Amino acid sequence: MSSFATFPAMTPFFFSHWSLSGEDAGWINAAFFFGFTMVGPVMTSMTDRIDARRVFLTGCGMAIIGAYGFAYLAHDFSSALPWRFLSGAGLGCTYMPGLKLLTDRLPPGDQSRAIAFYTASFSTGSAVSFLLVGQVHLWLGWEAAMISVIIGPPVSIAIILLATSPKSLTAPRPWSQIFNYAPVLTNRFSMGYIIAYICHTWELVTMRSFLLAFLVYAHTLTEAPAWMDVATITALAVFVGLPSSVLGNELSLKIGRQRAITLVMIFCLLFSFSIGFTANLPFVFVVAMALVYGFMITADSSSITAGAVGSAPTELRGATMAVHSFLGFGGGMIGPVVAGIVLDRSGGTESTTAWGLMFISMGAITLVGPLALRLTRK
């Protein structure tokens, strides 16, 4: 995931360097998740037939090409799109297939804690990417920052080759059924969680796409201490998703999955409706809001994914994960574009009101989540 933040971590730089609008930035962020959405589900479905390890390694190869192309061949809005698409496709071939790779190698029983730690790695990888890109950009320049992320996927390939071995599937799904998603779409328990995941991912991806740019704006309005580096703060706001995802799963085990997810979504709604309007307040307060929001926004991630996977028959887990990622990250693809349009139409990147309305547009989707969870009731 090293190339995850190649664009989001330097959005303010690209605003000026490539003369981008908020909508342009939204589309570049969306291209990444368009690649994830178009390629990832197809390859995830294949894991019901072939070893997910092979799919994961293929995704790492795609990620290398995408990172290399963005570093050396992207020079404006149009040329950035295909390389971000390819990087997203690489992530699509590793994220859910990686979860299948893991669950196929775990003993039978409740796998929710393992899934919680795995989904938390998404936040960890995102945070490391923000930190890597931000610090290299600060010390060595923007070109070195884009080149530095190429190192991630080869390291991932080495880890998988050393830490895992090939595994044959005990009951592979027939080729004629590999892309038959009807059993998933008619499973109301899985679909309830999947619809909630659309809401979660819409908000999460949009928040991470624009958080650094918002903090840069807030930083310019106040006399913030020089040591408060925006890139590091953004990385920390993303990194707190690691304990948040794990603790959120523990909460769901204590009070029930549907209740825990609903509670988290309500808290996120409150933050999304207020954080954008705090830009004029002391920067320390804005940072505190960002950190708490970063913690809360991932607290339901593992619970939703564990619910979707746990409600699927074993032979349909790959297909369920495919639909889960396709629809979920479809929300992640649309969210940044909608947010960018709202930002432009309501005043642009130099308006506190525009930032406030952008965050509202981002968080309002979570109102649908608790309603979707009613489908998961027995």
Image (cartoon, helix red, strand yellow):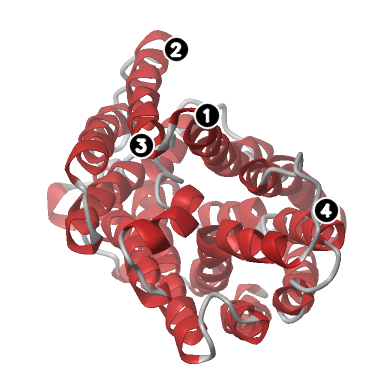
What whole-number distance in Å separates the C-alpha atoms at marks 3 and 1? 13 Å
Q: Position of residue 367 (x, y in %)?
A: 65, 84
Q: Which mark is residue 139?
A: 1
Nearer-N-terminus badge (3/2): 3
Up-down relation of residue 243 to residue 180 (above or below): above
Q: Nearer the viewer, residue 171 or 271?
A: 271
Asked if disc 2 and disc 1 are in contact, CB closer than 8 Å, the reply is no
Q: Position of residue 118 (x, y in %)?
A: 57, 37
Graded by Cα atoms within 10 Å as few (under 14), some (14 to 19) or many (20 or more), the crowding at tag 3 reads many
Q: Is residue 137 left or right of residue 14?
A: right
SS label for mark 1: helix
Q: Residue at x 76, y 39 (%)?
A: 227
Graded by Cα atoms within 10 Å as few (under 14), some (14 to 19) or many (20 or more), the crowding at tag 4 reads some
Q: Amino acid at mark 3?
A: Met
What whole-number distance in Å separates the C-alpha atoms at marks 1 and 4? 41 Å
Q: Which mark is residue 146?
A: 3
What whole-number distance in Å separates the C-alpha atoms at marks 2 and 4? 31 Å
Asked if disc 1 and disc 4 are in contact, CB closer than 8 Å, the reply is no
Q: Amino acid at mark 4?
A: Leu
Nearer-N-terminus badge (2/4): 2
The residue that disc 4 covers is: 251
